[in-house]
Amino acid sequence: YKAEYHATCKKLEEIPKGKQWTFDVSIIFVKFEKFCRRLEKLIDMFSSIQQFKLLESQHIDGLKHIIVNFNKLVAEFRKKQHHLLNDTDTAFERDYVEFTMNNSILENKIEVYIENEFKLITAAAVSSSSSNDDSGARTGNEAGIAGEDGAALNVSTTTATAVSDMANDGHGHGGGGGGGDISSIITSLELLNKFKLILHREALQNILDAKYILLFKSYGRSLEAIQDAFIKKRVAPTIGKNMTKVAGNISWSRQLLRRITIPMNKFRENPRVFHPKESHKIIKKYNALTKKLIHYEIEYYNAWKQCCNIGKKKLQTPLIIEHGKSGEFYANFDRHIFELIRETKFLQRMGFQIPASAKIVLLLEDNFKEYFAKIKNITEMYNHMIKCTSPIIKTIVTPHFECLKKIMRPGLNELTWNSMNISKYIEESQAAIQRLYTLICHINDILENRIRANLPTIANMCLLHLPANKSFTCKSFIHEQQKAIVKASNLLKEKNIEIYNAITDLIEQVQNFPIPAQFASNIDSVPTVEFNKVIYYYQTLMYQSIFGCIKTSLTALQERASSRTLNLFSSNDEAVAATLFEVNLCLVVPNIQVKPSLNEIQDAINEIANKLIHTTEHILDWGVNEQGETCEQVPFFQRLSADNNVAAVLTMLTGAVEDTKEFVTSHLQKYKQFEWLWLKEPEDEYKQFIQQQRILQDFVDELQKVANVEQQIEKLNELESLACFNLSTKNLKYQLKHECQRWKLQFCEKLHNEVKQDLEARIALIKNFNTRLNREIKDFTSLKFVIDALTEIRDTQSWISMDFLSIFNRYELLEKYLGSEFLSNIETDNKSMLRVLWKRLLVTAEEVRDKVNELQEPFQHTLVQNIATFQKDVAEFDASYKQEGPFACDIQKPAEAMVALNKFEREFDTLYRKYELYSSGETLFGLEKTKYERIKTMKEELVLMRQLYNVYGSVMDTMDEYRNISWTEVMSSIEKMRGSAELYENKCKKLNKSIKKWDQYKQLNTTISNFLEILPLIEAMSKPSMRPRHWEEISGITGTHYDYTNFDELSLSQILDSNILEFVEDIEEICEGADKQLRIENDIKNIKESWDKERFEFAAFKSRGEVILRGNV
């Protein structure tokens, strides 16, 4: 209306002379404009409502709360009941502004939602791309993209056709990287398309366009990843399971193409993404990659078409091929033909054009499979017959195999897989193979069930009856085995005839089996000699089986009779059950013997072995020799008797029991431990036993020794296994027990006397305690006497129970060996009353202890007074001990110290008894203990001092003894003196550490050390090399005169008193010089004596007279 108004005004202006409209426009259109603005607001509001309704209909996750808030907003607006077309309603304007603001907030939330969704999809794409480089979807869509606005996609018609054909395939295998990115891009595009159809506001549309561009950039990066994957895996891509190589590779490339075309089709719906320059590069990448994938597919297809002709040529090979070495037949069908058929099927399904050669092969697929299966079955049956035919039998069935080969020969050199008469050839070959297979089955049936099954049975047969749980006497052994041999020999005869009949039946079947007429003239028949060789072969096996039977029987007998295969010394049930003979042990003093004898048992074994060999005298061979000629039948016994292996087994069996003799002798040695029971007399042994001083334990040991022997005898088994014998020891055990009883009676008397004394001593002890407890308490001494008795009773309680147990145990031992009647009545009463008396004593002790507690107060008062007096006595004794005791004596006068020590020891003993008396009184009355530390110290000092002066006194006595010996006895006493000094030195070292701090110890140690130091010097001075001149030199050095003219009068004390330790070096030098001078004197003396014996004779020299020694001296 407004536009028409302005148009009319313009027309009127063109007519100046006409009347012009001069209306006030603002007055005319103000209401119109105001109403139009109201309509625009309503349109905006309804557009928002329509937009959110569409959102609600799409059911997008995460937007439900936004839609709910918007519906609330609309509901609140409706509640206000505005007249929407009344433009004068100002309340509407206010509510509209509020509605718009709230709507903007919700739209902002939608923007945030879109942003978050894109972040989640992008993160999922990155994760999927890193973990699934080879994964991909198996669905495909049609491809064919064309750009708009001048950016057309350069996709060739061939590519579009190939992609269209691939879409019809409907599935493919994923390959290459970028799979996760492409999937996320497709998901994002679908989400954006939904929002694009719903959101019409310009701001939201701009956001969606920006997201489209970002996705297209991501798509470009995915193209690069797919291209890298294609380059990396195009040689050996990942293909589907059971797919062929060519079809799999083409399917892989198509799948890559599908990955890049599906997103591009979706981008095509929003052409704005192609406008930026960056998008042009992505389009070029897309076109280049598409060309590569199409080229890859075409190359593989062309290569496959070339292989089809090669596969067709492989059908020109023969049906069967023969192995050069083994002669086995195999179906000669190339496996690659089946591969060609599979490739053809796959490519045909994928829409490729199939060459004519491949189509022909595909059409004949069923025939090829059928022919191959049948030819394979024929060759396998032929090979099976070759393998299952025994080599010895092949010589007599050779004509039949030659006939079969002639029937099968066309398949080796004439027929190919393209031949027309393959079916006829297969039928003839199958019939011939089935015919010969029937003969081979009959032959193998006879061999397995009638020959080979019987031969091991004969070889493993035992001709003897030797049950594992049965033993024999010599007579029963011979009788039982003869019966078993007769029965088994009859069975051998029957088996020999049965096997011979089987061989003749086998030969008869081979001879009667016909050869087809067309081949009869070309195939030679088998000579009779070859059939006889087959008979001889199984005759030899029959002999080996009979030999094995004889050897098995002899070996079984040898194992039961030999000591090498059994537990030689065993008593368990299995070993006893495995023995062969029953024998008895008899005690014939002085030895134990076995009956019956081992020679009788050996004779029985030899007799049965000979009968075993002679069982083959009535079993004849089959009358054929090694050359295949017939001859007279002879018994198998002739070959067996000449066989060295049989002789070896017989030799071992003959000496089976002989080997056991050593083990019998060794086994009987176990009874030597008991032979003293009957070889020695108990009376004589007892007299010799009591000649020495014996204690009770010695008698107990002797009794226990006999008891142990008796237990060992009791443990002996009544049946023992020794090699092949069961030994009975019942009578032997009875005799040995009788001997043990005699020995026990000899050694019980001393044990009885000792336990009787112990019993009487314990009775006396109890009486003594009763006497002491019944003493009247008059003073503190008698009180202590009673208290000491109570204390001793309490101490005795700690060991008296064990002592009672020992007494009763020994009486039990006597009763065990001698019986209770051996004891007297008095002794029996004392034993029975011992524990009763002790319990009564304990009751009396409790009564006395109560009485002592009643007398506590007066004695306690007296004790306190005595303790006060005793403390003064201790102080006085301590003062006297310090002033006059052994520590106060001069250390150079040990005799005085020893006298003082003896004096104070006597006085301290009296003092210490009082200390013990008063201390026990304090304990008795529960008084506080008075401490006498000085008493303890003095006691320790006196004990240590006594130890020191005991050594000191011994040293002084020994030194005085050595000082008084004469000088002539010194040399012989040196070792004794040295030994004594070293002994005292060791005693000093072992003294308490506290003693070693005393001056007295140091003085003693110095005395011993000086004596040890002076001994070597004395030893040197007493040597025979010392002369009077040497003694004069020593006298001059020491300033002491020695009477060296009379050493008997010279004592050691004179030498020791001259302080020779001060001149040790000088005296040692003199003694060494004396030794050297003595050696020189001895050398001069020896020279003189030597030359005194010599005689010199002189001779004349020219005219000068006798002036030279004779030369013959």
Image (cartoon, helix red, strand yellow):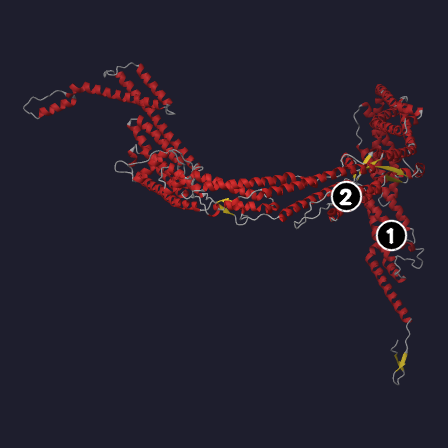
Q: Residues within 10 Å of mark 1 (few under 14, many from 20)?
A: few
Residue 282 place in picture, x, y as percent: 32, 39
Is 971 left, or right, of 417 in this rendering? right
Label 2, on which residue?
Answer: 614
Residue 1064 place in picture, x, y as percent: 82, 56
Instruction: Point out which mark residue 929 bears.
Output: none
Indicate the quadrant where residue 89 lies. top left
Task: Identify the amino acid type marked 2.
Answer: His
Q: Are marks 1 and 2 in contact (CB under 8 Å)?
A: no
- Quarter of the image with the N terminus is top left
Q: Residue at coordinates 14% horizontally, 22% vertically from top-left?
A: 4
Label 1, on which residue?
Answer: 975
Task: Identify the amino acid type marked 1.
Answer: Glu
Q: Residue at coordinates 86% horizontally, 64% vertically from top-left?
A: 1079
Total residue callouts = 2
Please tell me which residue lies in front, 25 or 871.
Answer: 25
Is 49 left, or right, of 933 in this rendering? left
Indicate the quadrant where residue 879 lies. top right
Please tell me which residue lies in front, 142 or 519.
Answer: 519
Indicate the quadrant where residue 1000 lies. top right
Is 1065 left, or right, of 20 in this rendering? right
Residue 1087 place in picture, x, y as percent: 88, 69
SS class of the residue under badge 2? helix
